[in-house]
Image (cartoon, grey):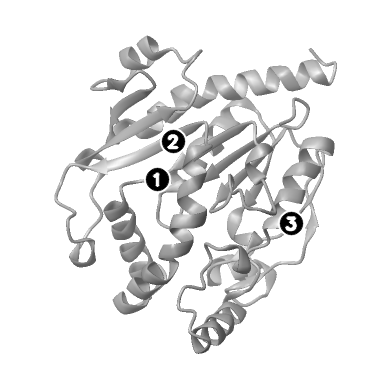
Amino acid sequence: MSEKHPIIAITGSSGAGTSTVTRTFANIFRREGVKAAIIEGDSFHRYDRKEMRQRMAEEEAKGNRHFSHFGPEANLFEELENLFKTYAETGRGRCRKYLHNEEEAAPYGQEPGTFTPWEELPPDTDMLFYEGLHGAVVTDKVNVAQYPDLLIGVAPSINLEWIQKLIRDKTQRRYSQEAVVDTILRRMPDYVNYICPQFAVTHVNFQRVPVVDTSNPFIARDIPTADESVCVIRFAKPKGIDFPYLLSMIDGSWMSRANTIVVPGGKMELAMQLIFTPFIWRMMERRRRALGLA
């Protein structure tokens, strides 16, 4: 953690909805005039798309059917930890981008599924913002979770997460149903060992829960809408959270536990704005004081 160079990390698995949180923070940053260095978690995969397919085939030939993007063998955990550590200390670091599709790849003249070269972060940023799979990962070799000043977990109910992934990968990435199901099954051990434990160390968790039947996600034709779900928001340390204010501002919300507020699914982004804007204010105020600018 760092007052001069704060870090915010959003962590959640593929299809969890972390992009929604990222969009909300982008709006807050723009409104509050915050210059953030944006880090995409996919850029810390160890292999590009072709290399990953080759490694998966090699591992499967050895009898390992669970080699996945969720585990340490396919990711640069040490480099991610070093980025967080270096940024917290100096406000500097190195990053790259993973080019998911032709639209992202075209400006770089590269093939989709490849990485851009490593480069230095932009100078004079106010904070670092990470969104990806491993913002709070802890193993016997690394402890990424110790560095962020604000850790946010996004973990929809598991069937909803699978529906979101199935439909996204089939429609946007043109994968077959069988390919997406195979990916879900292959990732399960790493999901249990490296994704789920992160939600025990996050500061705030968002869990979208559908209120329609999702009992068989593999035959779902569409993703439950925001109005067909509720969002459970859990605070690890609720001290200082103005729950009466949130309840008054978010129509239809209620408290389910002393540290948990439930809001209608359509109000999730509003809840994020109300909850995290004061966090950003406090971070920026501490940063100004630490730099002698207050």
Are the residues at dot 2 and dot 1 in contact (C-beta closer than 8 Å)?
yes
Q: Give the residue pinned by disc 2.
A: 205
| Left/right of residue 170 with respect to residue 153 in the rendered view | left
- Residue 188 lies, with reference to residue 267, above or below; the image says below
Q: Find numbered disc 3 in the image and state the secondary structure of the residue it sits on.
A: helix
Residue most toward the front? 140
Tell whether 75 sits left or right of 87. left
Determine the CA span between mark 3 and mark 1.
25 Å
Q: Which residue is mark 3?
A: 79
Please, what is the three-letter code of the amino acid marked with disc 2? Answer: Asn
Please, what is the three-letter code of the amino acid marked with disc 3? Glu
Residue placed furthest toward the left: 213
Cβ–Cβ below 8 Å for labels 3 and 1? no
Q: How far from the left and from the top, in percent, is residue 213?
A: 14, 51
- What residue sits 78% from the left and 49% below the top? 121
Taking the spot 32% from the left edge, 30% from the top edge, the residue there is 267
Say which element carries label 2. Answer: strand
Nearer to us in this view, 88 or 250: 88
Question: Is residue 110 positioned above or below 288 on the image?
Answer: below
The image position of residue 243, as x and y in percent, is: 39, 14
Q: Residues within 10 Å of mark 2 (few under 14, many from 20)?
A: many
Q: Please rate how many residues cluster around mark 3, counting C-alpha atoms within 10 Å: few if below 14, some from 14 to 19, many from 20.
A: some
The earlier-in-sequence mark between 2 and 1 is 1
| Among the 4 quarters of the image, the one containing residue 171 | bottom left
Which residue is depicted at the point 49% across and 52% down? Answer: 195
Disc 3/disc 2 C-alpha distance (Å): 25 Å
Callout 1: SS: loop
Q: Earlier in the sequence, mark 3 or mark 1?
A: 3
- Which amino acid, by three-letter code, is at mark 1? Ala
Label 2 near label 3: C-beta < 8 Å?
no
Disc sitting over residue 155 in the figure = 1
